[in-house]
Amino acid sequence: MSVRAPAGHSLTPVMTPREIVSELDRYIVGQRDAKRAVAVAVRNRWRRQLVPEELRDEIAPKNIIMIGPTGVGKTEISRRLAKLAQAPFIKVEASKFTEVGYVGRDVESIIRDLMDLSVKMVREEEQEKVQVKARDLAEERVLDLLLPEPQAPDDGGEEAYRPSPDTREKLRKMLRAGRLDDRDVDVELTQNMTPMIEVLTPQGMEEMESNIKEMFSNLLPKQSKRKTVKIPEAMKLLTQEEAARLVDMDTVVGEATRRVEQSGIVFIDEIDKIAGRESVHGPDVSREGVQRDLLPIVEGSTVNSKYGLVRTDHILFIASGAFHNSKPSDLIPEFQGRFPIRVELSSLDKNDFVRILTEPKNALIRQYVALLETENIRLLFQEDAIEEIARISAEANERMENIGARRLHTILEKLLDDVSFTAPEMPGREVRIDAAYVSERLDAILKNEDLSRYIL
């Protein structure tokens, strides 16, 4: 059962670790240790907010390293976790910082990008809160466009023409009933004059480029753009504009900053690609350099963003890697120390694939059935077909590079290629997928090793 914050605290209810694991189970098969680790990490953030203030800042998040091959659910666990916690989430690849053209790249851009995502998230939430008022204001603007403009009195002293309130109300009823949907109106939308500026900045100074562009954007006047659209489109555009005006951006930025600092999640993939410190020259220097670049934001520092200063002290960092040719102990000691929790994710076998195809809420079989239902095609997967798909996927992973559950996407695309292509030409048809159907289309490819490397 979810626990609420004690009296005096304004924190929202947070799911218990058991509830978090249960929710993750709806989308991800197995990997219980990893799910438990991230569930406890999220719950600890809520607990930290309730401890005495003098202790609160001292409690650092327990960052996690997930160890396991590709395609076993590392990224998906983190992404789903962020969604459950309504937390800003960003995924970066550690290896990108060692590639040609990226050496010395500003790792603080990770936090700036996270802040951008958080502002967008909060702004959309705030705009949703004012949708009713925004729609009312948009409706008034559309009515103004539909009604004839008042006319000034002529020289004879006749009174100016003004539409009566009854006329406006009649039009309002027609508008709400959809009887004016075919009418065209000219809407005037306000927009910033975005300058086409390309600023050449040295590596590691991307923030300067962003600030220069923002400065020019703020200096230039806003301009209006006229657009002829149908009434429903006009209502949509004007509602969006009014919602944006009603939202206080200072409040948005304040809440976005709070969320990044208190509940932000950074997922660093391919951390094993920067695990190297034995050599004193060559690529190992670059790898150790990236670790040292990342260390300040993981340890806790203040990053300057276009929205102001952002502290990283309590952001949760989840790193992941296959660690085929290295191990977590190959990371520099300071970096290891900031990731005290290690969880190993297991490889997936045939039985796991059967469960992945059928159990999750967003199971692949359900996705393909729903896609082809849009063409009025009824796709029926027999149990033996699912077993055969799982067997072929597991075998393909054994023979070739093991890409985990991602192999299922490739197998299903190949299996249903003909049906997907011809679906518009055979509406109302039922397509039954059994083991024989699967074998007929995939066995020959799997047996031809050279061909399977390119197709599966």
Image (cartoon, rainbow, N blue to C red):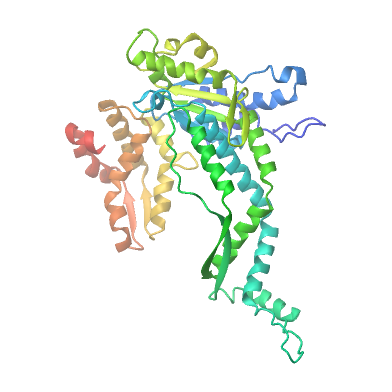
Q: Is residue 300 above or below residue 396?
A: above
* Residue furthest to the right: 7
Q: Is residue 300 above or below residue 101?
A: above
Q: Residue at x 54, y 45 (%)?
A: 216
Q: Quadrant of the C terminus?
A: top left
Q: Residue at x 29, y 42 (%)?
A: 435
> Where in the figure is residue 345, as x and y percent of width and height?
45, 22
Q: Name the one closer to the observer, 406 or 29.
A: 406
Q: Quadrant of the N terminus?
A: top right
Q: Name the one closer to the observer, 76 or 160.
A: 160
Looking at the image, residue 19 sits to the left or right of residue 370; the answer is right
Q: Name the one closer to the observer, 92 or 439.
A: 92
Q: Is residue 4 visible?
A: yes
Q: Residue at x 37, y 52 (%)?
A: 379
Q: Is residue 176 visible?
A: no
* Residue furthest to the front: 155
Q: Is residue 414 above or below residue 74?
A: below
In the figure, residue 259 lies in which quadrant?
Answer: top right
Looking at the image, residue 330 sits to the left or right of residue 401; the answer is right
> Where in the figure is residue 349, as x and y percent of width and height?
37, 27
* Residue furthest to the bottom: 156
